[in-house]
């Protein structure tokens, strides 16, 4: 029964990945603020660019992998620190070369942190305030407030901490890979180098928000969860629970990882034992909301808030309502949903929830079945195949004079505190910027191709070691079918895509070049 469930999860993800690949052959998903403004774009695939970039990346990947294999003779004590230090240097260079200043929500949370630190101003929790509507963002405000208190008041300090969290994620990617692919007798430095140089993670350190931090915590949680499944150690499940609680505190999508963790533990009930299964699930559940409960208790006891935090916050139905939009297929609806909560319901959570339920019901009844199918298809395809996690806006940024773009939406895509020769080269929709986005986009496509290979190999060989990673990815797919979308929102799963795609690439390389790779060695052992 357990094997059947494992296989089912692999098959479900295989179907989604196959749809992503097949759709990308015909459809180009884009996010380019200079060209289109703040809009999700689906157009015809541009094969004249797509195919050459595929060939370029495949050739480069094979060459780099061959070089990585030569590193096997060197000790991890030498190679791992060297790779991480090189990655740190690259990331530091990027934040100096692209000095993007905070905009949108990142500017709001930073301003609130400064108001609370220097003026003891907690008025944002009052009716109509930002934290009244979105109290879950107090976690990033508190984090920024702490950094501002401990260190010089400078964007670079915050970005340097982003780099530290990003480096933690890189380490965890490598450790997760070694856990789920422990049959490999090689040192597999390639996956570490891939993770350390993954372009979206390098650029998104420029985003002063919660994505990088939450990704580090949630990825760490998965590593310790996998270790618990293998070692049955109480220490590992407690550490996993702490990382999960912190990851959820910074981004309220930890419940996806919690559900995946519980299912993974239940799938391994026979090897773990019933007693440990019950206690481990209890530990995950009990610690899950401790940071939020602690935060709320402190705010109320200090008199910073006059009512329980979140009592009249924007309801989840607001984001579900945004998620149903035929024209923009679930992307930001230009304040339409906000106005229902703010103006029609006057910031009342219960009243706005009823209004949103009615709005959702109207949308579903007025749209035809064909319209809904097309909308959800576009929604899934754009979210998962855009591939850059919107690093164009949130990582690279744009000079304010050109930031308005030529598309609908306007505003500033993320201006710079100063400009230089590199920012000039990547200004607007320049060839350099477009080329960089193409490389990241095609890399994402190739990652899906190799994930497909890995999934097929796992099903054929009846190896299901990566089921915990697959469950998290499936959880994100299911959640963002319903929720408001941005391709940036799925950033926390990039570490899992890196692990699975590298496995698929390694399997393919071993097969083509007749190397005795992991799969072959495993099959020989089985005999």
Image (cartoon, helix red, strand yellow):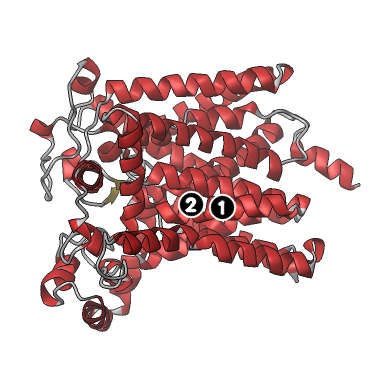
Q: Dot 2 lies on which element?
A: helix
Res. 15 visible in picture: no
The reply to whether callout 2 and callout 1 are in contact (CB within 8 Å) is yes
Residue located at (20% from left, 45% from top): 115
State which quarter of the image contains the N terminus.
bottom right
Q: Is residue 359 above or below residue 421?
A: below
Q: Is residue 115 left or right of residue 27?
A: left
Res. 482 visible in picture: yes
- Residue placed farthest to the right in the image? 527
Q: Which residue is mark 1?
A: 242
Q: Is residue 126 above or below residue 184?
A: below
Measure the alpha-carbon separation of dots 2 and 1. Answer: 6 Å
Query: Who is closer to the viewer here, 368 or 357?
Result: 357
Q: Dot 1 lies on which element?
A: helix
Percent x, y of residue 493: 48, 49
Q: Is residue 96 left or right of residue 240?
A: left
Residue located at (69% from left, 45% from top): 180
Q: Is residue 459 left or right of residue 337?
A: right
Q: Residues within 10 Å of mark 2 (few under 14, many from 20)?
A: many
Percent x, y of residue 385: 39, 49
Residue located at (27% from left, 83% from top): 361
Q: Which residue is mark 2?
A: 246
Query: Who is closer to the viewer here, 440 or 292?
Result: 292
């Amino acid at each position: 029964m357990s094997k059947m469930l494992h296989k089912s999860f692999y098959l479900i993800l295989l179907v989604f990945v196959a749809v992503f690949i097949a759709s990308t052959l015909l459809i180009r998903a884009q996010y380019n603020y200079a060209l289109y403004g703040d809009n999700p774009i689906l157009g015809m695939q541009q094969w004249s660019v797509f195919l050459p970039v595929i060939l370029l990346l495949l050739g480069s990947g094979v060459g780099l992998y061959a070089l990585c294999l030569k590193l096997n003779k060197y000790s991890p004590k030498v190679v791992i620190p060297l790779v991480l230090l090189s990655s740190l240097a690259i990331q530091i260079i990027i934040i100096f070369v692209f000095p993007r200043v905070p905009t949108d929500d990142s500017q709001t949370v930073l301003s609130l942190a400064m108001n609370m630190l220097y003026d003891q101003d907690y008025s944002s929790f009052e009716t109509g305030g930002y934290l009244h509507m979105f109290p879950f963002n107090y976690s990033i405000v508190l984090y920024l407030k702490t950094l501002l208190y401990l260190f010089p008041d400078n964007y670079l300090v915050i970005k340097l901490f982003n780099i530290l969290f990003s480096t933690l994620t890189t380490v965890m990617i490598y450790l997760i890979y070694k856990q789920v692919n422990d049959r490999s007798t090689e040192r597999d430095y390639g996956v570490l180098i891939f993770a350390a140089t993954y372009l979206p993670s390098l650029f998104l350190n420029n985003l002063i928000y919660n994505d990088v931090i939450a990704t580090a915590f949630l990825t760490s949680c998965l590593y310790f969860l996998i270790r618990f499944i293998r070692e049955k150690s109480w220490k590992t499940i407690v550490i996993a629970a702490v990382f999960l609680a912190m990851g959820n505190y910074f981004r309220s999508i930890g419940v996806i990882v919690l559900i995946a963790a519980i299912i993974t533990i239940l799938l391994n009930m026979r090897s773990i034992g019933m007693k440990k299964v019950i206690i481990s699930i209890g530990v995950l559940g009990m610690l899950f909301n401790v940071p939020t409960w602690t935060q709320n208790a402190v705010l109320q006891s200090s008199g910073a808030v006059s009512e329980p935090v979140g009592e009249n916050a924007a309801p989840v139905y607001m984001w579900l309502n945004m998620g149903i939009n035929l024209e923009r297929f679930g992307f930001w609806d230009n304040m339409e949903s906000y106005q229902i909560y703010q103006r029609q319901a006057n910031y009342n959570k219960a009243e706005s929830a009823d209004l949103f339920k009615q709005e959702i019901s109207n949308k579903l009844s007025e749209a035809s079945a064909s319209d809904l199918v097309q909308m959800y298809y576009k929604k899934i395809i754009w979210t998962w195949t855009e591939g850059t996690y919107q690093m164009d806006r949130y990582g690279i940024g744009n000079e304010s004079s050109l930031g308005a773009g030529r598309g609908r939406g306007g505003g500033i895509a993320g201006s710079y505190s100063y400009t230089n020769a590199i920012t000039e080269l990547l200004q607007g929709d320049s060839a350099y910027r477009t080329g960089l986005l193409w490389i990241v986009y095609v890399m994402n496509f190739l990652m899906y191709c190799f994930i497909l290979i890995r999934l097929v190999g796992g099903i054929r060989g009846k190896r299901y070691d990566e089921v915990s990673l697959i469950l998290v990815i499936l959880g994100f797919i299911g959640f963002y079918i319903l929720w408001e979308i941005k391709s940036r929102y799925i950033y926390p799963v990039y570490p899992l895509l890196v692990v699975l795609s590298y496995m698929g690439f390694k399997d393919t390389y071993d097969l083509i070049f007749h190397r005795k790779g992991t799969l072959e060695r495993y099959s020989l052992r089985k005999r």
